[in-house]
Amino acid sequence: QQQVKQSPQSLIVQKGGISIINCAYENTAFDYFPWYQQFPGKGPALLIAIRPDVSEKKEGRFTISFNKSAKQFSLHIMDSQPGDSATYFCAASIGTGNQFYFGTGTSLTVIP
Amino acid sequence: GAVVSQHPSWVICKSGTSVKIECRSLDFQATTMFWYRQFPKQSLMLMATSNEGSKATYEQGVEKDKFLINHASLTLSTLTVTSAHPEDSSFYICSARGLRYQETQYFGPGTRLLVL
């Protein structure tokens, strides 16, 4: 049973556009929601994370939007660049640093 | 900060041999380390969680006798794939959580294992 559902599976965006990746969860006990970026043959790297007491968090071109009532959160990449082409995973956990439940991943391609 | 290394980055071995993969937290003490397995174009599958000085907790369906995990120090955890077979070929990734970085997990670069 997939605890965190992620969509779309793949995404193609033009350079300069906005990339949007969505995740949904059911377990209301989740209280930590990170996003990871993974390049081929590399380990995931933490991009940005949010807790449910905040509806939005922005770091540079990356923004997480969080909707607690809908149990959804999304990653927005503004001014997308070819270097952003990677696989993005959302995740959720209960408590501090416990097991992460990962989404299925989104393969992002930014075309010049 | 929060750098995690893995060694080796890739390994090719013959069927029936054992392979050891090391995971090190370079600039923090890792109280908990996680081991994942990832198949091509798929998500990360948690194999086991290990706390320093304790036995690892394995996820359902993961053979503890096949995937031996040792977390003997606050900076090192090892995964040994015993009597490896071609179906064990995969990308193995570790992550670490520490006293200084309690909230999240920091991932290593992964180890590609190919069993012939």
Image (cartoon, coloured by chain):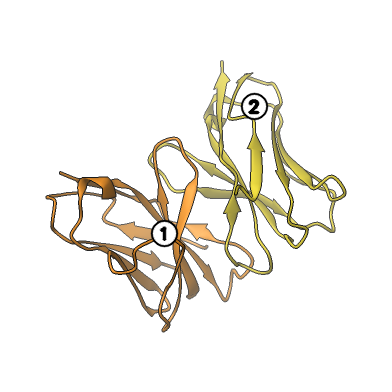
Chain colours: A yellow, B orange
The answer to whether B77 appears left or right of B113 in the picture is right
- Horizontal and vertical percent position of residue A17: 69, 21
Which residue is painted at 84% across and 44% down in the image?
A70
Q: Which residue is mark 2?
A: A80
Q: Is residue B98 above or below residue B108?
A: below
Can you tell which mark lies on residue B116? none
- Horizontal and vertical percent position of residue B35: 42, 61
Which residue is painted at 59% across and 68% down in the image?
B101
| Amino acid on which the number 2 mark rests in the picture | Ser
| Amino acid on which the number 1 mark rests in the picture | Gly
Q: Which residue is mark 1?
A: B61
The answer to whether B96 appears left or right of B7 in the picture is right
Do the residues bearing badges 2 and 1 touch, measured as CB atoms within 8 Å? no
The answer to whether A44 appears left or right of A36 in the picture is left
Which residue is painted at 87% across and 49% down in the image?
A69
**Residue nearer the viewer, A78 or B77:** B77
